[in-house]
Image (cartoon, helix red, strand yellow):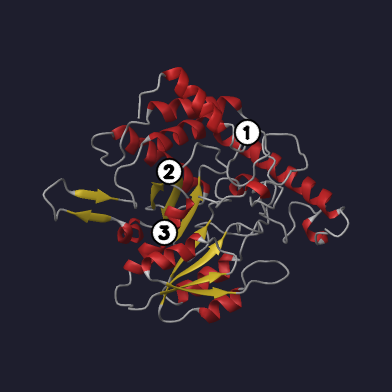
């Protein structure tokens, strides 16, 4: 392979990029999240590049990354009502956060030889990936066929002495509705199991809608029995990919997904996540974007996304043969049926219109790819 000059490389990269879906303008669903705030994009890319060569493996070598990660964990904790003594880590995305939550639940109960976790059918596929990786049996429970929310009674009935984890979503990826976390978490606590809330979609947007939705379904650490919460920054915090935050109610609950080993001739390996070497770019870029947009900025973006979602739902409901239940259209944001429903992204859900004027979305089905978190 011969060396290429810089201009040739740029031309080739531009040609390759031209085959991709657009990352800005609100026309690509699920894969990218466009805030429409140009300055946030600028500072995010700038800091991502500046920290791309740093290594999150060792915080003593790059203490800036540790400080920024701690700041992000603290910000996330405030959003989801984390109690004093909570702990958290930055991961590469929602899937890694979920993997670690399942691993922590399994390894905290070594006496259980055949661990199980109870999942609504609407939970993200990452839980099935975790089940496959870690040998935890998924017990899948049907949701309410009308509301698409988890059925607390059915979830409770599925819990047994081998259950190490019970899962709820805030909101579910496919339907954008918040599961009834209160009774689900209570059932888990009564059985001595952990309860994880997957808020990878809603974690950075639902808290900013509370003032408009005072009856929003409770789903944070304010709910007794919730032991961990995951929320993605590269979704509705609009940061460069890939970064998510996994929070635990206490540092003790986090301990079982930490890894340490000195059983080799090299350095002592100490990992808080699945990865060892990892670029510090995503953490630093997230820190920059989150601090630039700020709380008021996120509240404004959340309201715009919510408003656009309802406009699109109303438009879809007017199309013959594509009616939506009346409760999903033209309802107040205080509706129980839709409360907390964000523009949950999926390749066939055209409700993602953040930072742009509300518009009909064109399908990207023909170029659908596997969704990564």
Disc 1 and disc 3 in contact, CB within 8 angstroms: no
* Earlier-in-chain disc, 3 versus 2: 2
The residues tagged by marks 3 and 2 sit, at their Cα atoms, a distance apart of 21 Å
The residues tagged by marks 1 and 2 sit, at their Cα atoms, a distance apart of 29 Å
Q: Nearer the viewer, mark 1 or mark 3?
A: 1
Extreme residue in the front direction? 1
Residue 301 as seen in the image, left or right of residue 59: right
Name the mark on residue 191.
Answer: none
Residue 153 sits above or below residue 350 on the image: below
Q: Nearer the viewer, mark 3 or mark 2?
A: 3
Mark 2 is surrounded, within 10 Å at the Cα level, by few (under 14), some (14 to 19) or many (20 or more) other residues, namely some
Name the mark on residue 74.
Answer: 2
Q: Nearer the viewer, residue 342 or 49?
A: 49
The answer to whether residue 226 of the structure is visible from this angle is no
- x and y percentages locating residue 291 in the rendered image: 49, 32
* Residue, disc 3: 99
Extreme residue in the left direction? 265
- x and y percentages locating residue 76 in the rendered image: 48, 45
The answer to whether residue 213 of the structure is visible from this angle is yes
Q: Residue at x 33, y 77 (%)?
A: 112
Q: Residue at x 71, y 66 (%)?
A: 147
* Residue, disc 1: 24
* Earlier-in-chain disc, 1 versus 2: 1
Mark 1 is surrounded, within 10 Å at the Cα level, by few (under 14), some (14 to 19) or many (20 or more) other residues, namely some
* Earlier-in-chain disc, 1 versus 3: 1
Residue 269 sits above or below residue 103 on the image: above
Secondary element under disc 3, as helix, strand or loop, is helix
Residue 144 sits above or below residue 286 on the image: below
């Amino acid at each position: 392979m011969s060396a290429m000059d810089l201009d040739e490389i740029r031309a080739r990269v531009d040609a390759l990029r031209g085959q991709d879906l657009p990352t800005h303008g609100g026309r690509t669903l699920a894969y990218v999240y466009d805030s429409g705030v140009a300055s946030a994009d600028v500072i995010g890319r700038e800091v991502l590049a500046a920290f791309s060569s740093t290594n999150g493996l060792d915080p003593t070598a790059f203490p800036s990354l540790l400080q920024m990660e701690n700041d992000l964990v603290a910000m996330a904790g405030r959003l989801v009502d984390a109690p004093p003594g909570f702990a958290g880590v930055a991961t590469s995305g929602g899937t890694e956060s979920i993997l670690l939550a399942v691993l922590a639940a399994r390894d905290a109960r070594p006496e259980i030889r055949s661990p199980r976790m109870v999942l609504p059918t609407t939970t993200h596929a990452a839980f099935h990936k975790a089940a496959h990786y870690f040998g935890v049996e998924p017990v899948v429970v049907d949701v309410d066929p009308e509301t698409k929310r988890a059925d607390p009674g059915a979830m409770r009935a599925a819990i047994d002495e081998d259950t190490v984890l019970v899962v709820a979503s805030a909101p579910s990826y496919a339907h954008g509705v918040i599961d009834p976390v209160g009774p689900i978490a209570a059932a888990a606590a009564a059985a001595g199991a952990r309860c994880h809330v997957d808020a990878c979609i809603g974690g950075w947007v639902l808290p900013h809608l509370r003032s408009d939705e005072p009856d929003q379904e409770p789903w944070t650490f304010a709910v007794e029995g919730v032991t961990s919460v995951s929320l993605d920054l590269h979704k509705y915090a609009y940061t460069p990919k890939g970064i998510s935050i996994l929070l635990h109610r206490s540092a003790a609950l986090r301990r079982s997904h930490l890894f340490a080993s000195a059983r080799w001739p090299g350095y002592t390996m100490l990992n808080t996540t699945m990865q060892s070497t990892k670029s510090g770019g995503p953490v630093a870029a997230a820190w920059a974007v989150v601090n630039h947009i700020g709380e008021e900025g996120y509240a404004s973006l959340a309201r715009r996304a919510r408003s656009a979602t309802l406009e699109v739902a109303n438009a879809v409901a007017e199309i013959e043969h594509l009616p939506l239940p009346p409760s999903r259209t033209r309802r107040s944001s205080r509706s129980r049926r839709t409360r907390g429903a964000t523009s949950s992204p999926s390749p066939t859900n055209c409700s993602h219109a953040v930072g742009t004027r509300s518009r009909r979305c064109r399908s990207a089905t023909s170029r659908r790819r596997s969704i990564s978190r």
